[in-house]
């Protein structure tokens, strides 16, 4: 029998399906998502939870004319399947395939870019103002989770939307989760509504009275008072109405009929922003994900090619594992050490520390700006905070890093997970800007370990450092080296020479060190001898060592998983020019572009950041060198 999903080529194909057929379609969508995401990797539990909501949205509204703005976007897989991308869904998160997030370049149904949380309402407010300014007539719907709505940006947007009073629909997808369980005062308010059956019972009773009553306006007013009073009893502040929104809910987010009825109702609210409170289950329809939504929030693809053991059957820990273990060790040794996470205790591998030392882990929710400034406040009071945030998310707190930490020179440690090329999550998640945006800040020390053993020492060094220090480390397993049993302090700004050679100097940063060493071995077989330097500190870098090396070996290549603009390579080029050193320099980095999704292996190969690419670039650098080499300065990019 032909599946209903196979008949859906656009949202218009949903219009004539019956409720029974729609529920069957929902099951087929979930089956397709489970099959594909468990193979390709991706965000499973979030998308499973909004299947019925997505169907209802596309039944009631006319996308892309009406603008549906998905917050974060990892809940948009059903949306992709229903908007003409069903046949391409097998390419999800694959190189040159569908993005794992919303991308307007991919489809006109993706009304706005999404990858970082809490931006949907702001974007929707902008769309509403644009719509009204040109006299257009379409709906704008922001779909945001209860975790993302606690973000400062979302609260700012709600405040502005309520002030404007313009026609806007916000759908609150309330499942009690972000990646981890939602935390904070607002989460407690949501929980009182989500789990209190009295509100549901009162709502249903009011409906029955209204349907059977002929008492007119008096009974209508009475039932409204009952509803309002009970809502106030369950949610005392009625926060959304205080924000200036009409409030509708809570509604069963897995009942397509109820969802459509609510959405059709709010379509008629022409002069006020409206919030629809939808209760969903993260991971709905897939028992393992329902049972453990945290683990099934994001899955890694099968057969990633990442080495998981050291050849002796011993599992290689990830950099995240090593960070968390070291942070816990430091928290036990140093009474003033705490770790701050922005709704990512699992992503930062802090689960064990949360269980064993709960007072030492502070989860602020999806609030990176608050996390950084709070860390500054902690540091000013004698506490040593470690702010553990993914590289791409720390971008959101750029001003706070400058104004609230670096300017007063406070001893805050930044642990930047997922730095460099992260792979399948794509453009919104590649951590390729941190070396640039952190290195330009006065007082900031910026470091990157060559392996997981060095990571633990750099974290210890950062704790001992009397000022702000950032350590960036990559996604995935470590190199597989042995660990030193004792932590040691590494002198700030001091690099190390790993291999000596007379033909070329390789200045490698962090995750680029292992492929640089491999490239040096390959080059040696061709007669080219390379000196390989583990830079370790991008700021301050080892001026004396580099100056001495380049004076004697005028072929230089810098290697970093960071954009070239403002990166380590540009700093070295500027330094050598200002020092009057005549050398031939190649800066090997990510060019001035956003990096698409694909495996880490394929993307590193694309940008010549793998051993083979490094070998080719060095060979060209030396082979193409004009004579006499010592009388020229040549900078290539």
Image (spheres, helix red, strand yellow):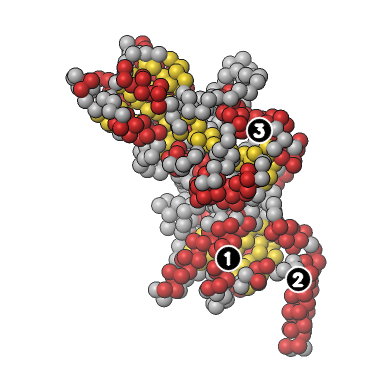
Question: How far across and how far down the image is residue 285, in percent?
Answer: 67, 49
Circle nearer the viewer, 3 or 2? 3
Give the residue at mark 3: 327
Q: In which quarter of the image is residue 452?
A: top right
Circle 2: element type: helix
Measured in 3D between alpha carbons, the distance from the residue under mark 3 to the one under mark 2, in whole angstroms, is 43 Å
Disc 1 designates what residue? 158
Q: Is residue 434 shown above or below 75?
A: above
User: Label for residue 232?
Assistant: 2
Q: Quadrant of residue 483?
A: top right
**Residue at position x 62%, y 39% in the image:** 386
Give residue 360's position: percent from left, percent from top: 71, 40
Q: In which quarter of the image is the C terminus?
A: top left
494 and 563: which one is in front? 494
Residue 453 in the image: state x and y as whole percent.
Answer: 58, 23
In the image, what residue occupies the spot 23% across and 20% down? 630
Name the front one of labels 3 and 1: 3
């Amino acid at each position: 029998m032909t599946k209903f999903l196979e008949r859906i080529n656009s949202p218009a194909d949903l219009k004539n399906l019956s409720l029974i057929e729609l529920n069957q379609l929902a099951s087929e969508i979930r089956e397709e998502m489970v099959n594909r995401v468990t193979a390709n990797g991706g965000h499973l539990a979030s998308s499973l939870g909004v299947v019925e909501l997505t169907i209802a949205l596309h039944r009631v509204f006319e996308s892309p004319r009406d603008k549906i703005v998905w917050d974060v976007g990892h809940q948009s897989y059903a949306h992709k399947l229903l908007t003409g991308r069903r046949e391409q869904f097998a390419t999800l998160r694959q190189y040159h395939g569908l993005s794992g997030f919303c991308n307007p370049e991919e489809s006109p149904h993706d009304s706005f870019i999404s990858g970082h949380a809490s931006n949907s309402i702001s974007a929707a407010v902008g769309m509403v103002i644009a719509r009204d300014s040109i006299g257009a007539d379409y709906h704008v719907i922001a779909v945001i989770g209860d975790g993302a709505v606690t973000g400062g940006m979302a609260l700012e947007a709600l405040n502005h939307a309520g002030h404007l009073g313009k026609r806007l629909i916000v759908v609150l997808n309330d499942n009690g989760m972000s990646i981890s369980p939602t935390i904070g005062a607002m989460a407690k308010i949501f929980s009182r509504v989500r789990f209190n059956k009295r509100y549901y019972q009162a709502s249903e009773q009011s409906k029955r009275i209204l349907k059977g009553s002929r008492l007119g306006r008096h009974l209508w007013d009475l039932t409204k008072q009952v509803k309002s009073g009970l809502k106030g009893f369950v949610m005392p502040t009625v926060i959304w109405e205080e924000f200036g929104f009409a409030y509708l809910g809570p509604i069963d987010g897995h009942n397509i009929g109820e969802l459509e009825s609510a959405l059709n109702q709010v379509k008629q609210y022409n002069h006020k922003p409206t919030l629809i409170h939808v209760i969903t289950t993260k991971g709905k329809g897939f028992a393992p994900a329902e049972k453990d939504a945290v683990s099934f929030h994001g899955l890694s693809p099968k057969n990633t090619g990442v080495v998981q053991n050291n050849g002796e059957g011993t599992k290689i820990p990830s950099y995240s594992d090593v960070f968390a273990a070291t942070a816990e060790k430091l928290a036990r040794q140093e009474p003033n050490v705490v770790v701050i996470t922005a709704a990512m205790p699992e992503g930062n591998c802090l689960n064990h520390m949360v269980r064993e030392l709960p007072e030492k882990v502070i989860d602020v929710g999806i609030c990176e700006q608050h996390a950084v400034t709070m860390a500054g406040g902690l540091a000013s009071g004698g506490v040593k905070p470690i702010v553990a945030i993914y590289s791409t998310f720390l971008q959101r707190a750029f001003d706070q890093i400058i104004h609230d930490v670096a300017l007063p020179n406070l001893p805050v440690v930044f642990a930047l997970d997922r730095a460099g090329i992260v792979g399948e999550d794509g453009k919104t998640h590649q951590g390729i800007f941190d070396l640039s945006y952190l290195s330009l800040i006065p007082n900031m020390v910026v470091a990157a370990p060559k392996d997981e053993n060095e990571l633990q020492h750099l974290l210890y060094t950062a704790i001992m450092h009397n000022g702000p220090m950032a350590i960036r480390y990559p996604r995935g397993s470590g190199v597989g080296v042995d660990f030193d049993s004792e932590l040691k302090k590494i002198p700030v700004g001091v690099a190390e020479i790993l291999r000596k050679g007379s033909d070329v100097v390789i200045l490698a940063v962090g995750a680029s060190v292992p492929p640089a060493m491999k490239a040096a071995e390959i080059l040696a077989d061709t007669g080219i001898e390379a000196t390989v330097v583990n830079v370790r500190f991008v700021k301050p870098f080892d001026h004396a060592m580099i100056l001495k090396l380049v004076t004697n070996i005028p072929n230089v290549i810098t290697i970093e998983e960071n954009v070239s603009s403002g990166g380590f390579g540009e700093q070295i080029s500027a330094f050598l020019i200002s020092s009057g050193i005549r050398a031939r320099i190649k800066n090997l980095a990510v060019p001035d572009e956003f990096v698409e999704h694909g495996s880490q292996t394929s993307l590193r190969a694309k940008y010549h950041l793998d051993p083979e690419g490094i070998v080719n670039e060095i060979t060209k650098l030396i082979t193409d060198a004009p004579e006499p080499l010592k009388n020229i300065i040549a900078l290539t990019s």
